[in-house]
Amino acid sequence: MHKSIQRYSDISAQSVNADAPLLKRVYANRHIQNDNELDYSIHNLLPFTGLKGCEQAAEKIAAAIKQQKRIVIVGDFDVDGATSTTVAVKALRSMGAINVEFLVPNRFEFGYGLSPEIVAVAKEQFNADMIITVDNGISSIEGVITANRLGIEVIVTDHHLAGEVLPEAAVIVNPNQPGDGFTSKMLAGVGVIFYVMLALRSYLRQQGWFQQQGLDEPNLANLLDLVALGTVADVVPLDYNNRILVSQGLARIRSGHVSNGIRALIDVAGRDSSRLVASDFAFAIAPRLNAAGRLDDMTLGIQCLLSDNLAYAGQLAQQLDEINHARRDIEADMKQQAEKILAHMQLDDSDLPYGLCLHDRDFHEGVVGIIASRIKDRWHRPVIVFAPAENGQLKGSGRSIKGLHIRDALDAIATRHPGLIKKFGGHAMAAGLSIAEEDYALFSAAFDQEVRQHLSETDLTGIIMSDGELKSEEFNLQTAEELRFAGPWGQAFPEPVFDGIFHIRYKRVVAERHLKLTLQAEGSDTEVDAIAFNSSDADWPASTQKLRLAYRLDVNLFRGNKSLQLMVEHIEPLP
């Protein structure tokens, strides 16, 4: 068994009155000390003046706008990259920039980041005078050198961890660069470029630019729906500053102040914009946008987000939805292959490597990250999944668990085995890399060895943190509604999970892989519906009628009617 349930109350150093209102108990479990930490007013955002390089970047970009220089935004092919690119393009155009274009490297042709090849494209295609990177660039040493040689000024905006050598850009804006005192280190790439645009607007205002040009000063709050989506999609920790950004973006969407692209994606996903929450970003909107970068070209996704025409945005959103269906099919096939590889290894739980690597010639480079995440969740250990690339190389995507900083682990392996890793980058929980196909076995062994230096066998048992058992009077639709909008919930500020003992009254498998249950809480006469996604009762004793569950309360909307539903996170059959 790879997971177990543990209650916050069992480990909390602070005493929370069991009779306190539910939300107070939930917030206390997330270390909220006072109501001020739940005030998500926009004026509580940290000021851009604390972000190193932000004001210098604003001055240089302002000069480029005034001189009508050709500015090219170079983004990344994930949702954070797409929203970052869109925020940059929309903001710059609203501030009077005439020549603004964007480039997103196709992952299959160019790979990640500001490579020399992408710099050449920016020069040839747009005759770029300035390149602004978003959600990348901190490791683009050679790309920046190439740009400098071609006379292109480079502004790097990124949030990934810096290596030992920084690119020789005109300005670097990254809360994680050496010497940066910005207290929120968890900004996503879209958060970083949003801050740069705030600084740019302030600088242009001081210069009297908007009056001189007869421009209305732009309301950058109109971009917060994009900032919220990118922040949630990149799974960065939702510290207080990020919760403000996400909360503000969600509030605008619910009130109808939403960009055409996001509105179209919400519609194609079948969500209600007036009830949208962060988990809708994560599980409904982001996958459709991400699919373009995984299987095709993220340019399609950015065009959707940039569109001023709702009908056209709807057409693009429909295309993204179709690509996402294809991504799901590929992912399902790859997951089966991965399971077969594990079965072929003939390993039981005790024999599994601490750091698990998987590779198959039929794996698709675009979805290895998703598969790594799925395998990591099931076996609760760091996982890297590789797919074939050009020139006899493998491209891998890794996902980690608490206790192992996967980018630092790759750095240690690269130091210990020079030349083994061709290139790598990432952060604590996710990373990407390239190796020679012939070095796969050597790398697999090195990765397992490195992981074993950081994790114990106990670390490989996943802990599901529970807010405890609900009282009978809290087990209702009203509580579910209250919790739904009490967030934003997300990474490092998790949605409330509860546990309890239930009796099975009815069960069946739906859509071949989800378990639908009707349950009765022990000591109660009330029955409630529950669903466990990607689950089965195949491993239970046939006589199982009693379960201990970890679950979330959810509101099920069907034909306009609301009902309480449990979203099952973990099941432990009981005798």
Image: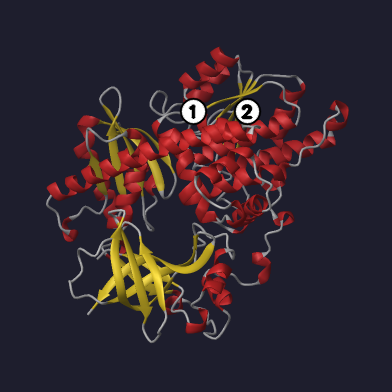
Name the residue rendered at 31%, 38% in the picture: 330
User: Residue tagged by mark 1?
Assistant: 141
Residue 77 showing in the rendered view: no
Alpha-carbon neighbours of circle 1 within 10 Å: few (<14), some, or many (≥20)?
some
Name the residue rendered at 37%, 64% in the picture: 531
Q: Secondary structure at mark 2?
A: loop
Q: How many marks?
A: 2
Is residue 185 placed above or below 100 in the rendered structure? below
User: Residue tagged by mark 2?
Assistant: 170
Foreground of the two, 439 or 303: 303
Residue 334: give x, y in percent of width and height. Answer: 27, 41
Position of 201 compared to 309: left or right?
right
Residue 297 showing in the rendered view: yes
Quarter placement of the C terminus? bottom left
Write down the quadrant of residue 305 in the picture: top right
Foreground of the two, 122 or 58: 122
Residue 10: give x, y in percent of width and height. Answer: 42, 79
| Res. 541 mark | none
Q: Secondary structure at mark 1?
A: helix
Name the residue rendered at 21%, 39% in the picture: 442
Residue 156: give x, y in percent of width and height. Answer: 58, 32
Q: Label 2 is placed on what type of residue? A: Ala
